[in-house]
Amino acid sequence: MKNLRLLSLLMIVASSLLFVQCTSDPIQGPAGRDGIDGIDGVDGIDGADTSAESCISCHSNTFRAPIYAAYETSFHSKGLTEGSVEYAGARASCAQCHSNEGFVDYITKGFVNPAGYYGLTEPELVINDNGTPDDDSDDYPELDDRGLPIYSNNPVAFVTSITCTTCHSDHKSFDFENDGNDLALRALEPVSLMTDGTVIDYGDGSNTCINCHQPRRTGPTDDGAGMFRVTSTHWGPHHGPQATLLEGIQGMLVAGAEAYPGVGSAAHRTGSTCVSCHMGATTDGTDGLHTMIPSSASCVECHSNGIPSDDFLASDMATLAGLLETIGIVHEDHPVPGTYSILEAEAAWNYLLILEDGSKGVHNPKYAKALIKNSIEALQ
């Protein structure tokens, strides 16, 4: 029995020595070779700023509230003219510029709805046959006391007025540093005029303006007998010839003492843009920015010696208006249907061009002055 206990004790001691060897290494091995120095890594390229802050800088109520307030005072927000959204905004021939739906369709699709923008009732104009029922070439729509066409039915317009989303949609790129901030404007490309295809490029957001601020028709042409027929009380360049006046084109170059400046030579064409003049810094919150009313703050950036007067053509415009009234081709600033000499029609066109432009000739003073003065000289 004693021998058995001794044997067990020896086995326990031997086992404990084995555990010591497994859990420790009292014998130090030879040193390894030195490692090779590694090459420093290349710094990564900074990523685009995709943080919420980069979007919030514009897309926040704080940023947008003053824009909304300014736009509410603008001519665009008022529907442009009385009744124009319900009337012109729904008509296929007018909707491009008089309604949100028409402009968006024109820019995104290249055309407006050919049937117009109405509910269940299509419009039927009351047409005056001008006493010649067998000849529709001199027919024209009957107008109400506001100068708007009269319908035989009651068409229901299905359109909205010009709003933020009329001109603004989605950014083409969020890489503003390399691609520029397009302000999510729908129309930034150069514009081909609807009258003759002439391409005008004012750059940046100013090209958006050209889409609507251009004439709807070209000037009168000789019928071969030295005459021209005015067929409508709406004849003329229409209400938005600003781009062509600024460019110095599509006026009737009546011969006279005043020289016509070169195309595209106006200082407001070469030294500024629609946006810089009409949407520049505000002076008191009632002009500039999204009111689109030129501010003196914008003017003095170029006119450091003081803002020139805008009534330099007032007397000549009054003189020409009187001559045209006497002839009978214009009455209270509206054309009168009838047949006139080509010279009388050209003078009337020039008068309506400056009148409808709305800047009193300021967009292109030298060109406007030549058009009006030469027209007066030709009629006297």
Image (cartoon, rainbow, N blue to C red):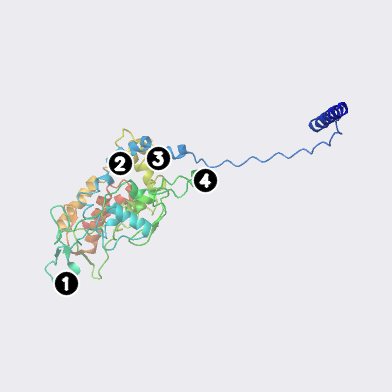
- Are the residues at dot 1 and dot 3 in contact (C-beta closer than 8 Å)? no
Q: As rendered, which of 38 and 340 lies closer to the eye?
A: 38
Disc number lying in front (3 or 2): 3
Q: Residue furthest right?
A: 3
Location of mark 1 (residue): 135
Q: Are marks 1 and 4 in contact (CB under 8 Å)?
A: no
What distance separates the C-alpha of mark 2 from that of mark 4?
30 Å
Marks 3 and 2, Cα distance to the nearest angstrom? 17 Å
Image label count: 4
Circle 2 — which element?
helix
What is the x, y in percent for residue 143?
Answer: 15, 57
User: Nearer the N terminus, badge 1 or badge 2?
Assistant: 2
Question: Which residue: 36% across, 46% down?
Answer: 274
Above or below 65: residue 257: below
Q: Quadrant of the C terminus?
A: bottom left
User: What x and y, as percent, mark residue 47?
Assistant: 55, 42
Q: Which mark is residue 275?
A: none
Q: Are marks 1 and 2 in contact (CB under 8 Å)?
A: no
As drawn, the label of residue 178 is 4
The local crowd at label 3, few if under 14, some if 14 to 19, many if 20 or more residues have their Cα within 10 Å, is few
Question: Which of the labelled discs sits on residue 71, or is there none?
Answer: 2
Of tags 1 and 2, the one toward the viewer is 2
- Give the distance between the C-alpha atoms of the residues marked 3 and 4, in whole angstroms: 21 Å
Give coordinates of residue 257: x percent, y percent: 30, 54
Residue at the limit of the structure toward the bottom, as seen here: 134
Q: Amino acid at mark 1?
A: Asp
Please tell me which residue is depicted at 31% across the width and 34% down the height of the picture.
Answer: 285
| Image coordinates for residue 203, horizontal then vertical, percent | 42, 50
